[in-house]
């Protein structure tokens, strides 16, 4: 995925998905640069170097797949809610109309 695609998907807010850091099995490591050798290293404790950012490793499922599954589940729930809504309206309106005509 290119940087332009990512910018369009997050509406140019420069934010990222919650699943990027909190996916199944993901571990976030801080990345530091060693001031003596200028090499990057990941360390869990405070280092003697400068903080560069974070790296995410060990994810079981890529966050893109989790996002798609999450959106698909929401669509299924909406369809189920719509069907239940129609059934409830038919049940309620059916009883009301039959009571008016018989009464």
Image: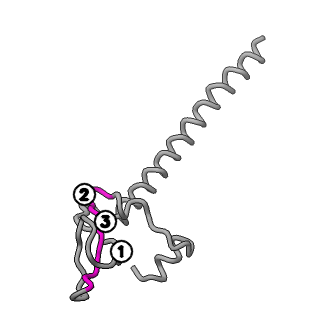
Give the image location of residue 19, x and y in percent.
Answer: 38, 60
Give the image location of residue 43, x and y in percent.
Answer: 23, 69
Distance of mark 1 from mark 3, alpha carbons?
20 Å
Q: Residue at x 56, y 72 (%)?
A: 11
SS at mark 3? loop
Indicate whether residue 63 is drawn in magenta. Answer: no
Q: Which mark is residue 25?
A: 2
Quarter of the image for the N terminus: give it. bottom left
Q: Which is in the foreground here, disc 3 or disc 2?
A: 2
Q: Residues within 10 Å of mark 3 (few under 14, many from 20)?
A: some
Distance of mark 3 from mark 2, alpha carbons?
10 Å
Q: Earlier in the sequence, mark 1 or mark 2?
A: 2
Q: Earlier in the sequence, mark 3 or mark 2?
A: 2
Q: Which residue is mark 1?
A: 53
SS at mark 1? strand
Quarter of the image for the C terminus: give it. top right
Q: Nearer the viewer, residue 55 or 64?
A: 55
Give the image location of residue 46, x and y in percent.
Answer: 28, 67
Q: What span is in magenta?
A: 23-35
Query: Dots 1 and 3: beta carbons under 8 Å?
Result: no
* Residue 72 shown left or right of residue 51 in the figure: right
Q: Nearer the viewer, residue 43 or 20?
A: 43
- Hey, which residue is sitting farthest top in the picture? 103
- Hey, which residue is sitting farthest bottom in the picture? 37
Distance of mark 1 from mark 2, alpha carbons?
20 Å
Residue 24, quarter of picture: bottom left
Q: Which is in the foreground here, disc 1 or disc 3?
A: 1
Q: Which residue is mark 3?
A: 62
SS at mark 2? loop
Indicate whether residue 34 is drawn in magenta. Answer: yes
Q: Earlier in the sequence, mark 1 or mark 3?
A: 1
- Residue 30 versus residue 78 in the image, above or below: below
């Amino acid at each position: 995925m290119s940087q332009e695609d990512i910018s369009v998907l997050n509406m140019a807010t420069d934010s990222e998905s919650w699943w990027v850091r909190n996916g199944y099995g993901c571990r976030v490591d801080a990345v530091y640069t060693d001031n003596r050798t200028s090499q990057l290293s990941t360390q869990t404790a405070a280092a003697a170097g400068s903080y560069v950012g974070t790296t995410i490793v060990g994810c079981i499922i890529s966050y893109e797949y989790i996002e798609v599954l999450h959106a698909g589940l929401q669509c299924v729930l909406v369809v189920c809610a719509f069907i239940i809504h129609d059934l409830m309206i038919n049940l309620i309106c059916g009883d009301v109309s039959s009571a008016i005509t018989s009464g």
